[in-house]
Amino acid sequence: MRIAIAGKGGSGKTTISGTLARLLAQAGRQVVAVDADTNPNLATTLGLQPERVQHIVALPRSLLKRETQPDGSMTSTFLRDPMEVLEEYGTRAPDGVRLVVMGAVGHGGAG
Amino acid sequence: MCGAHATVRGFLGELVAKAPDAFDIVVDMEAGLEHLSRGTGKHVSRFLAVVEPYYRSMETARRVADLAAELGIAEVSAILNKVRTAADHDAVSEFCAAHKMKIAGEIPYDLGLADAERAGQPPLDFSPDTPSVTAMRKLAADLIATG
């Protein structure tokens, strides 16, 4: 299954996301948890220790090549094998959940 | 579209294309509504909106549902959260019925979560049998059962 959990800040969405990810993993499933919040704290909810949270590397934008076409539209090409990216950037969390964190929003580049 | 969101979207798109059934993917979306127009949720099959029993939260959920419908995102269902009383339950249930949102699960208001938060630990480890965690366990089982 592929689910996205949305809600206002403080609604409990991160607690629910992290707990569900762990419970799915405990049920024997391979789980990729993605922190796409601009204020990321899914790692802690998953149970990663603070010293490991510090060392999480977010997905760099260099993984995506974005080009403006002559007609003005924008195309995106993901440049790497997603399994390799998961190995490289996926942090192992309790129960075998792999956590991938979105990079900081709004600095430089195309923004 | 913001580069960080586009990168996540690109990664999820490739992962789903390469290994469609290998992984369960759980995306913790950003708090606002912008992620929907940025397409971060494009590669998910179910969209779950956390709804609390108070007006502004329900209003946000309504906008999420409207926007998701506009963008053609599969299905939006609600997770009722922090439900304290029968009146809470009725208010959010009526809201969901009025806006044709299915209810995926209901999680009670639970001080056990605040205890886990204070201890800096996941509720699942700190208080595995607290009522909210029990409700989330049921939600996970239901999600697995319904795919």
Image (spheres, coloured by chain):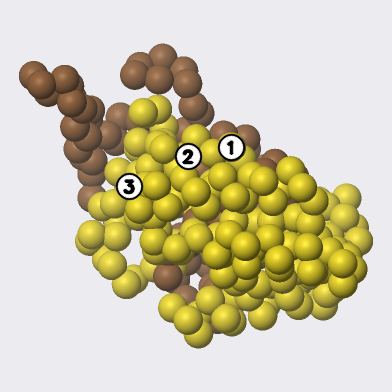
Residue ID for mark 1: B32
Q: Which mark is residue B10?
A: none
The percent coordinates of residue B14 (x first, y second) are 26, 52
State the image quarter where residue B21 is shown: bottom left
The percent coordinates of residue B77 (x first, y second) are 55, 64
The picture's colour for chain B is yellow
Residue ID for mark 2: B35
What secondary structure is marked by label 1? loop
The quadrant of the image that shows the C terminus of chain A is top left
Kind of residue at badge 1: Gly
Q: Which mark is residue B11?
A: 3
What secondary structure is marked by label 2? helix
- Near mark 3 (Cα within 10 A), the count class, few <14, some 14-19 or many ≥20, is many
- Give me the C-alpha separation between circle 2 and circle 3: 15 Å
The percent coordinates of residue A30 (x first, y second) are 44, 71
- Give me the C-alpha separation between circle 1 and circle 3: 21 Å
Kind of residue at badge 3: Phe
What secondary structure is marked by label 3? helix
Residue under the point 77% across and 47% down: B55
Instruction: Say whether marks 2 and 3 touch (CB < 8 Å).
Output: no
Q: Is residue A40 visible?
A: no
Q: Chain of mark 3?
A: B
Left or right relative to B26: residue A19? right
First of labels 1, 3 by sequence position:
3
- Provide the letter of the chain coloured brown: A
Q: Chain of mark 1?
A: B
- Near mark 1 (Cα within 10 A), the count class, few <14, some 14-19 or many ≥20, is some
Residue under the point 29% across and 36% down: A63
- Near mark 2 (Cα within 10 A), the count class, few <14, some 14-19 or many ≥20, is some
Q: Nearer the viewer, residue A58 or A92?
A: A58
